[in-house]
Amino acid sequence: MSGGGPIRIIPSGGAVRVVGGVATRSLVREEARAEARRRHPAGRGWRPDRARMLQRLADRAYVGGAPWPRVAAAVMLLRGIAGDDPPSFARRVGVSATTLAGLEAGAQPASSVPGCLRSLGGLVDWTWVDAGTRSDWGC
Amino acid sequence: MEAQGCEKDDDLEQVMRRLAAGDEAAVVTLYERYGSSIAAAVRHVARSRPGRLDDDDVGGAVLDVCFELARVAGGWSPAGGALPWVWARHRVAGAVDRALGQQPQSLDDHRSEVLDRLGEGAAPGPAAAEASLLDTLNRLAAQDEASRRPALVGAAPVGVEPSAAGEARAVERGATPAPDGPSAQGPPSDGSPPGAPGELALVGARPAPAAGRSPCVPIPVAPGSARAADSAAERIDLTDSRDVSAGVGLLAEAMDRGGVSIRDRELLLEYAYEKHSGNGAPAASVAPMFDMLEVSVRQAARRTRERLLRLAASEERFAPLADLPLLA
């Protein structure tokens, strides 16, 4: 806690957090809003379906003629989740912008994907990416 | 978790800018950060539609909306104040409709009634909702008789009661049927009884044209068949509006003489109506009315035309009929 403002209790999922102070005022407000949105019936029950998004991106890459559509989809998904533009993401993962562009175009095989991306767990099923080439598309 | 507050607005603008620039990864960003808001918009639209979307459908629709927003991101401006999925609400609605597909709806009484009427219209013969040309002409004839305007139709011979359906028949017709009437000309081509002598009809006015039809080509018709009947030597100029009405009476009589059945009369009128309205395939339009094949419609219309033209060629009195567009 910081500052000497009133202590406030905000819901945070199933737990309760105690925060206080002027410096945390915006945090309190925004977290409360986020929690309210989470609890609101209109937004309830929806979670990003990354596998579905991945498949959709792969389909688009396949239609676009990419030799490795699943690689393109996986890299694009990860950059999208990060919210980076291509140069920023290339720096983040330690590859050149050209390499990244090639990966996102599906022009390079799964073996070209940087290890730091492969080490991300839970976002992409790399087995699915490794198993798919353009020739066996449609499975 | 979604971005929040002013930061959220800035973030959204940035995402939309990336989308507008063609960065496909920004679709993922939009989906990840604003998916729940888009899902709320999807559910809001879905509530106004019949049918229900389950969570899986909503997820698919949200994806669709994200990709749709990517296509139109260049047109969105934060200055407008609307969120992209509100600004593009019609695309959201389109995604919802695609997810819902076609929805069956129970029929209420009104809809059932409308469908029943449509069903009647599909039955052989002219649609119930739209009077046939013959009926129309007969009704107009009755009105014309009352107003002393030229009647459009001949009537049943004197002494013949109007039809049970209450059809008003003009009874001005002075000409009696020719003694060698229909029977002398052979049986009707379709086996149905020929129209009662003098009962008839020619094209002309028709009520408001049905939807999809061009306005009818007016061929004024008339009553005054007495004139046509008794003036064998008198030539009728069908291009003269004063004589056209007499020509119609003449045609009616010719149909009697030719033994043209009621069905064939009506078929010829409908066929001519469609043809002169600009319908390139009149038989295709007329065939369902009479539950006939198109080729049969064409043949029936041709037979009737030829029968009348033979009559026009053989008897000078009917010669003017050869000039009628109806028989062209």
Image (cartoon, coloured by chain):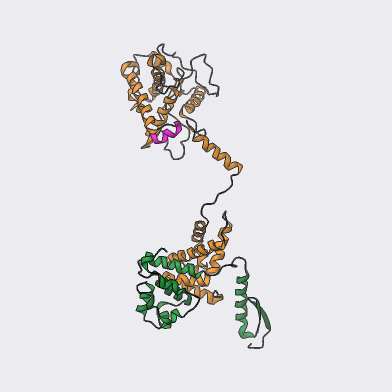
Chain colours: A green, B orange
* Residue located 52% across and 38% down the image: B118
Residue B241 falls inside the magenta stretch: no
Residue in front for this viewpoint, B220 or B123 = B123
Quarter containing the N terminus of chain B? bottom right
Q: Is residue B23 visible?
A: no
Q: Indicate whether B120 appears above or below B229.
A: below
Main SS of the magenta part reads helix
Q: Is residue A31 visible?
A: yes
The x and y percentages for residue B252 are 41, 21
Image quarter in which the C terminus of chain B is found: top left
Q: Residue furthest left?
A: B313
Relative to B43, say whether A125 is above or below.
Answer: below
Q: Position of residue A16 (x, y in %)?
A: 66, 79
Asked if B177 appears above or below B36 in the picture, the reply is above
Camera-nearest residue between B62 and B6: B62
Q: Quadrant of residue A68?
A: bottom left
Number of on-image labels = 0
Percent of width and height locating residue B2:
54, 74
Residue at the extreme top:
B179
Q: Front-most of B220 and B214?
A: B214
In the rendered image, residue A4, in percent from the top left (x then y), is placed at: 66, 88
Stretch of the chain drawn in magenta: B283-290
